[in-house]
Image: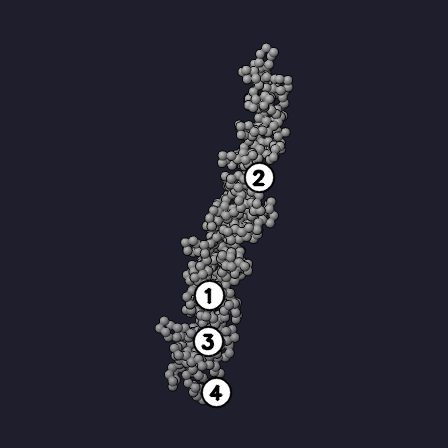
């Protein structure tokens, strides 16, 4: 649409009008012929009785002309006739289906004159008019409106016009339709108002966006919850003022039934992850994406106020994954009840009930052996890379070295991610013993150590392992450690340890069959008797404390 000032809209002169009326009647001295006639330089229209018509429209060659109170064609004038406004151009032709800028009167501005020549204006409940495929609003005087306009067609000029505004037009008057509006474009700094729906102040927003639908109406919420709408392949939320939500979606509540795992709930009280609308991109709902973000006040006021960011993962519905160990691109990740990705040692009761998370340096070796980790007796222990920024994935395998509080030790996690020997139940796996994931390795300086194993019957057996945690097997076998001490094995079990100068000997002697102390410098080389023979009650009086790996 190309708008022109009223003085430039037409160029047809009076001469052209005269030429187009070659058969109109003229006034003669003897009789007046009804119809068009020229009187001097002015055209008039005569009635049957020969008098000029006044205050009426008459047509000639498809154009309408207005005859004023003197009966002459009115030219270049804006006037009201029978309650409607009209404009006639410099050649007297009625303006129709066109724009004109009317500078005279109390309210100058652009007006549009329809097919019947009357100016569009707000009346009879009609607010919006379609012109050449675009939509416009005119006030009660017919002036085209721009800026924010309310639902009844009145301009809004408040400090925050977007609150009451339903429509918006730029200076050309065309209403935004199926289009976005960047409020910051003409309102630097945005607004200091609050959103009741999102519970945030607009000053906290990096931008303020609005969307106007196919009817040019601003999308906005009419309830306590955001209005959600799919637009051009993206999903968006809008608050009660129509402002795009560039942040977390609303949640009904956060359950603190488990204090270590606050969990988001929907309005029906069921567990459900919230949604995130990514204001750093285009404000659309994040689907199947990773987010590095801090939570809202509703989710965790402590983390929100300290801006404690975490990784979050959204699913294909746009909801944050919560209370779950979830596979993403062939890697498993852990998420708590709010949806924050967890790293380090993580406890889950099953795969859908987060229990707790611990940093790798939160516990010592003895805590894993003695089961001092809160929740470990009733939950499954996992390990997720403590490189939270770049990894965070689940780790599996039998020789994962983790630097805990008192050193670096080997841990084992099965193919399902669960700690081997979890829930305080030691387990032999791949010829090594594990308890709550910790592999029971002998100290490097000794080379060997002893693991106490409890049988289903309640009886105990003692197993020899090396510094790599591997079980040393043997029958009637003697193994020397780095300190010069001797371990004695029967049927793959340790039956004793001695710090003798000489290696014990397995034999049948005065005290029965077993391992005897041996001293080649004595005449009775076996005079000291048995050094060990019973698998259920071994002789460990000389066994170093460091070699007692779990007892």
Q: What residue is at 50 percent from the left and 79 percent from the top?
A: 484
* Vertical order, 197 against 455 (above or below): above
The tag on residue 412 is 1
Residue 23 in sight here: no
Residue 38 in sight here: yes
* Vertical order, 14 against 142 (above or below): above
Distance Cα–Cα, label 2 vs label 3: 85 Å
Residue position marked by numbered label 2 in the rendering: 146
Distance Cα–Cα, label 4 vs label 3: 31 Å
Residue position marked by numbered label 3 in the rendering: 548
Distance Cα–Cα, label 1 vs label 4: 47 Å
Residues at circles 1 and 4 in contact by the CB criterion of under 8 Å: no
Residue 524 locus on image (x, y percent): 43, 88
**Left or right, 87 with reference to 229:** right
Task: Of the two numbered discs 2 and 1 on the same chain, state the one appearing first in sequence.
Answer: 2
Residue position marked by numbered label 4 in the rendering: 521
In this view, which residue lies farthest toward the left? 457
Residue 331 locus on image (x, y percent): 48, 57
User: Which quarter of the rendering shows the C terminus?
Assistant: bottom left
Element class at badge 4: loop
Distance Cα–Cα, label 4 vs label 2: 114 Å
Tell me the quarter of the picture where residue 138 sits: top right
Distance Cα–Cα, label 1 vs label 3: 20 Å
Task: Of the two numbered discs 2 and 3 on the same chain, state the one appearing first in sequence.
Answer: 2
């Amino acid at each position: 649409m190309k708008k022109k000032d009223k003085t430039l809209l037409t160029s047809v002169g009076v001469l052209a009008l005269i030429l187009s009326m070659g058969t109109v009647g003229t006034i003669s001295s003897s009789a007046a012929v009804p119809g068009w006639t020229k009187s001097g330089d002015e055209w008039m229209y005569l009635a049957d009785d020969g008098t000029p018509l006044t205050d009426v429209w008459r047509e000639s060659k498809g154009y309408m002309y207005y005859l004023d109170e003197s009966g002459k064609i009115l030219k270049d004038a804006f006037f009201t006739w029978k309650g409607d406004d009209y404009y006639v151009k410099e050649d007297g032709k009625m303006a129709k289906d066109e724009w004109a800028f009317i500078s005279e009167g109390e309210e100058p501005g652009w007006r549009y004159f329809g097919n019947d020549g009357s100016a569009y204006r707000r009346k009879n409940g009609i607010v919006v008019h379609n012109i050449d495929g675009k939509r416009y609003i005119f006030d009660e005087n017919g002036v085209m409106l721009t800026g924010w306009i309310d639902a009844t067609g009145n301009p809004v000029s408040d400090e925050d016009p977007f609150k009451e505004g339903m429509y918006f037009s730029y200076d050309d008057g065309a209403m935004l339709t199926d289009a976005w509006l960047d409020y910051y474009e003409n309102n630097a700094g945005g607004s200091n108002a609050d959103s009741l729906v999102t519970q945030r102040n607009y000053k906290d927003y990096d931008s303020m966006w609005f969307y106007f639908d196919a009817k040019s109406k601003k999308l906005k919420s009419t309830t306590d919850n955001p209005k959600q709408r799919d637009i051009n392949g993206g999903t968006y939320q809008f608050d009660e003022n129509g402002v795009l939500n560039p942040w977390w979606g609303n949640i009904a509540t956060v359950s603190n039934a488990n204090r270590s795992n606050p969990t988001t709930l929907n309005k029906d009280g069921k567990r459900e992850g919230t949604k995130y609308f990514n204001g750093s991109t285009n404000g659309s709902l994040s689907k199947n994406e990773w987010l590095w973000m801090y939570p809202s006040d509703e989710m965790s006021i402590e983390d929100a106020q300290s801006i404690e960011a975490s990784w979050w993962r959204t699913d294909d519905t746009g909801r944050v994954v919560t209370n779950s160990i979830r596979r993403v691109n062939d890697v498993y990740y852990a998420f708590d009840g709010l949806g924050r990705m967890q790293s380090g040692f993580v406890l889950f009761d099953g795969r859908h009930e987060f229990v707790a998370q611990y940093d790798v340096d939160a516990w010592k070796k003895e805590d894993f052996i003695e089961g001092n980790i809160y929740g470990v007796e009733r939950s499954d222990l996992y390990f997720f890379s403590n490189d939270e920024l770049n990894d965070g994935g689940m780790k599996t395998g039998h020789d994962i070295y983790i630097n805990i509080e008192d050193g670096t030790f080997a841990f084992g996690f099965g193919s399902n991610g669960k700690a081997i020997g979890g829930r305080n139940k030691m387990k032999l796996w791949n010829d090594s013993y594990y308890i709550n994931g910790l592999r029971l390795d002998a100290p490097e300086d000794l080379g060997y150590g002893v693991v106490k194993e409890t049988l289903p019957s309640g009886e105990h057996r003692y197993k020899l392992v090396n510094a790599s945690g591997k079980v040393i097997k043997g029958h009637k076998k003697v193994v020397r450690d780095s300190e010069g001490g001797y371990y004695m094995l029967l049927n793959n079990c340790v039956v004793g340890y001695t710090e003798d100068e000489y290696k014990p000997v397995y034999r049948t002697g005065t005290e029965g069959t077993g391992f005897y102390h041996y001293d080649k410098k004595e005449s009775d080389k076996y005079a000291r008797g048995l050094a060990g023979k019973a698998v259920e009650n071994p002789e460990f009086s000389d066994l170093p404390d460091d070699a007692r790996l779990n007892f």
